[in-house]
Amino acid sequence: MKQLNLFLNTVVIFLFSGCNSSDPNDINEVTTPKVEMGKVSGKVLSKNGAKQIGGALVFTFNDKNEMYYAYSNANGEFTLEAPEGQHTINIQTGNGSNFRTEVNVDIKKNETTPLDNSVTKLNQVAKMAYVKGTYDDIESIVTGLGYTLTQISYDDLKIMNTVAQYDVIFLNCGSKLAATPNDQLVYDNLSTFVSNGGSLYASDWAVSYLTGGGSNSNACNMPGGFIPDTKLCSINNGTSGTTSNASISDVNLAGALGFNALDIHYDLGAWHKINNYDTTFWDVMVKKDNEALMIKTNKYHDSTAPQTPIGNSAADSWVTICHNPSGNNPITLTINQNAWPAHQAHGDTMGACSGNNTSGNIFYTTFHNHASGNIGNSGLILQYIILNL
């Protein structure tokens, strides 16, 4: 009987040990397959291929909606590492709603696939307009990049149906006339435009579109405008001359340009100087000591403004979202609407990662591409503004 018990115990121990085997060939063991990686490289260029574009976001996703991304350097060059296989590579500036390009690429394991310059040119999605000015013409820089825009008049700004056709409007210095009784229509329409996602660029004297006044603002708290007086005051008391060694305080702008200081030439008198601004509302992008020379916001919203489709938004099948890569800072980008459910399930949210979700951008610079053409590196800053509105 003792021998029989010993035999049974031995069998039980053997069976128990076999079920918990550490043999690597055991069929119950779960292993994580290795992700094979490759790279894709290229250079981001303007539509006409004339300019390299720094600071562009280049990204793709795997089948789990995990993002792989890189940024182009000041020469427009990038190298993106991602899993092997077929991918759609997205190239975007700003939040991707106005300028973006898609490229289909077969990424090969342990190889770098170069992209031809012909497929990495940044496409214009936005409908853009400008109001012609006296002292500068931002439109010449836009067309110099190979993009298109439509000239509209100051009176066109009084018609909301006209304003709403565009995603971006450039307000040139010297484009606003002396104060008239109908100016409030312009202010109201621009407020509605930005509140619904439209973006504005105003230079120098064109600050009066934002803060009120006539052809410019010669004091704080001028009548009109749509930006509250507590948010911004800019006065036309700047003198002619060169501001040396102005600093680029915005890290994204500095990275895109490849430099963080420049000289800005103000060749006329009565340039606008920013007298005061709300630091919680505006981001300073260029400054000289404590004086702001270029500011940006995406925090404007008028709760009383009607909801109005702006530009391509009514027919566009793309949406702007805040993507949250695991362990990284959230990134604002624009994706095809069909991909939104997967992103939402991944934890992404609709709208930009910062600022007001429905607001467009407002850029304001005290400098511009004035008539003498002596603008130097500030021309590169204006290019950045155009592509990041």
Image: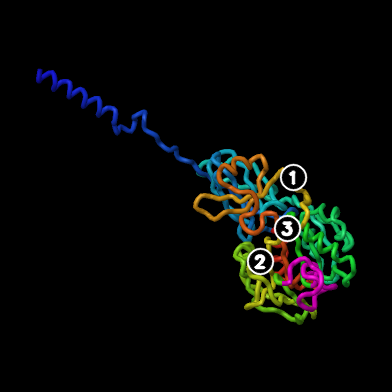
Mark 3 or 2: in front is 3
Q: Amino acid at mark 1?
A: Asp
Figure check: 227 above or below 217: above
Residue at the disc numbered 1: 316
Q: Pick the residue in front: 241 or 77.
A: 241
Tell me which corner region of the image, top left, top right, bottom left or bottom right, holds residue 304. bottom right
User: In the image, is 272 to the left or to the right of 62?
Assistant: right
- Identify the residue at image location x=74%, y=54%: 196
User: What span is in magenta?
Assistant: 205-229
Mark 1 or 2: in front is 2
Find the distance from the CA under tag 3 to the CA under tag 1.
24 Å
Residue at the disc numbered 3: 303
Q: Pick the residue in front: 36 or 280.
A: 280
**Secondary structure under badge 3?**
loop
Dot 1 crowding, Cα within 10 Å, few <14, some 14–19, many 20+: few
**Earlier-in-chain disc, 3 versus 1:** 3
Report if residue 224 lies within the magenta region. Answer: yes
Q: Amino acid at mark 3?
A: Ser
Is residue 146 visible in the rendered image? The answer is: no
Q: Amino acid at mark 2?
A: Phe
Quadrant in which the C terminus is drawn? bottom right
**Earlier-in-chain disc, 3 versus 2:** 2
Give x and y (percent) for residue 225. Answer: 79, 68
Q: Which mark is residue 281?
A: 2
Report if residue 218 lies within the magenta region. Answer: yes
Dot 2 crowding, Cα within 10 Å, few <14, some 14–19, many 20+: some
**Secondary structure under badge 1?**
loop
